[in-house]
Image (tube, rainbow, N blue to C red):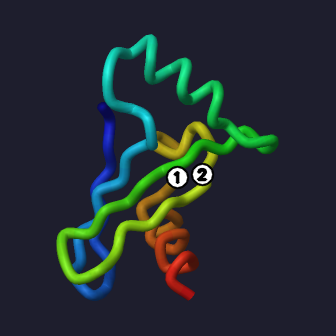
């Protein structure tokens, strides 16, 4: 399971991972195919190190490699607004 960790201005560390990414690679790929939306986005769950609630984001399938840390933090902040 691949994940990204980012830290926000309040020093909260967020660990982000694609929903349904656990289990076997074949199962995870099948789940990703079934859960992609019309724009090709996948669901990403970001869990804080403390004090905040987890958030669900809809991000491009390439979020792991191509979304900057700041863009990821901006998406997390947008869900809390």
Q: According to the image, label 1 marks what residue?
A: 67
Give the percent coordinates (x, y) of residue 56.
50, 60
The C terminus lies in which quarter of the figure? bottom right
Give the percent coordinates (x, y) of residue 71.
52, 65
Determine whether label 2 and label 1 are within 8 Å by CB: yes
Position of 65 with respect to 78 (left or right) is left
Name the residue: 49% across, 79% down: 77
Q: Is residue 20 above or below residue 24?
A: below
Q: Is residue 57 above or below residue 41?
A: below
Position of 51 with respect to 30 (left or right) is left
Q: Quadrant of residue 48?
A: bottom left
Give the percent coordinates (x, y) of residue 24.
34, 16
The N terminus lies in which quarter of the figure? top left
Q: According to the image, label 2 marks what residue?
A: 59
Element at label 1: loop
Circle 1 Cα neighbour tier, 10 Å, few/some/many (<14 / 14–19 / ≥20) = few
Name the residue: 54% across, 69% down: 75
| Number of the label disc, if any, that sits on residue 45 | none
Tell us which disc is closer to us: 2 or 1.
2
Element at label 2: strand
Q: Quadrant of residue 45?
A: bottom left
Q: Quadrant of residue 23?
A: top left
Report how far apart the C-alphas of labels 2 and 1 lie in the structure. Answer: 9 Å
Q: Is residue 78 above or below residue 15?
A: below
Circle 2 Cα neighbour tier, 10 Å, few/some/many (<14 / 14–19 / ≥20) = many
- N-terminal label among 2 and 1: 2
Farthest residue in the right direction? Answer: 38
Q: Is residue 75 above or below residue 63?
A: below
Name the residue: 54% across, 26% down: 31
Name the residue: 36% across, 53% down: 16
Farthest residue in the top direction? Answer: 26
């Amino acid at each position: 399971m691949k994940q990204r960790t980012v830290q926000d201005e309040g020093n909260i560390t967020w660990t982000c991972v694609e929903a349904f990414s656990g289990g076997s690679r074949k199962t995870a790929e099948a789940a990703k195919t079934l859960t992609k939306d019309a724009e090709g986005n996948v669901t990403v769950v970001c869990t804080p190190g403390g004090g905040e609630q987890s958030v669900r984001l809809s991000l491009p399938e390439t979020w792991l490699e191509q979304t900057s840390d700041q863009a990821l933090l901006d998406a997390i902040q947008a869900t809390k607004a």
